[in-house]
Amino acid sequence: MKHIIITGTSRGIGFELAQQFANKGHKVLALSRNTTPLDTIKHQNITTISVDLSNSQGIKKAIDFIKTDWKKVDILINNAGKLINKPFNELTTTDFEEVYKVNVFAVAELTKNVLPFMQKGSHVITVSSMGGIQGSMKFPGLAAYSSAKGAVITLSELLAEEYKEQQIAFNVLALGAVQTEMLEEAFPGYIAPLSAKEMANYIFDFSLTGNKFYNGKVLQVSSSTP
């Protein structure tokens, strides 16, 4: 039985992942602003906490729970994301701040606070995007989102080096298009080749075993362009 933190669990990949881990007997701490979807399921292995990850007080709520109830964390999946689709000349500083708060700053802050509870063999997975890969095809309107997803790739590579003596693994999954609510909101009518559940299946397996084979790596998980 593993103790697993997943962010962005109100819908899409995070929602599916939380259920998969719980159904396999693992303990899940599900962090998102909206906890209703998972609360409705009432799974004994899922604890939900309503958290605004862009607020340090929200992260403190999660850490207080870990201190009191879990004492340790085996896997952290930084899945939460925010996407704004606007032409570059319309993007404001506030838009960039909103995207970076969720996609970069919250990842760094939560990871920093969870690491003291992780031991040898633990695994931190950050969900990025093909848009954050240098040399990949880029799409107009995603200047804030894709640049943020590139930032967490570099952050994870650095942390893998910084924590290699503790043998805590850091890996990034750069996803292509997945049929999620976030994708539909940003690109109405676009049909992705993979469902949220299919991608969750892949991330589930990788979270449990990927750290045996990879550390400080970025895996491009995409069957199409994007």
Image: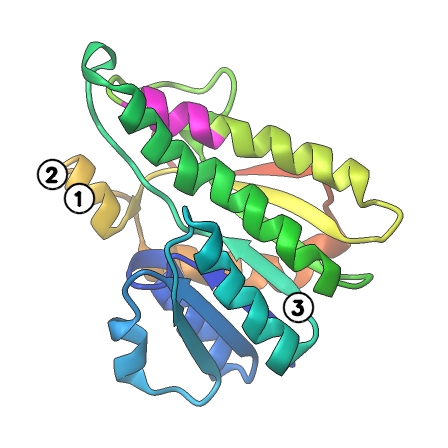
Residue 184's label in the rendered image is 1
From the image, tell me which residue sits under label 2.
188
Query: Is 146 covered by the magenta stretch?
Result: yes
For marks 3 and 2, the one nearer the N-term is: 3
From the image, tell me which residue sits under label 3.
73
Q: Is residue 40 above or below residue 162?
A: below
Q: Residue furthest top?
A: 89
Left or right placement of residue 178 versus residue 113 in this view: left
CB contact under 8 Å: marks 1 and 2: yes
Q: Secondary structure at mark 1?
A: helix
Most common SS among magenta residues: helix
Q: Nearer the viewer, residue 177 or 193?
A: 177
The residue under the point 44% across, 90% down is: 44
Q: Is residue 210 visible?
A: yes
Left or right placement of residue 72 versus residue 126 in this view: right
Gap in Å between the C-alphas at discs 3 and 2?
37 Å
The residue under the point 73% across, 44% down is: 215
Rendered location of residue 189, percent (x, y) = 10, 39
Gap in Å between the C-alphas at discs 1 and 2?
5 Å
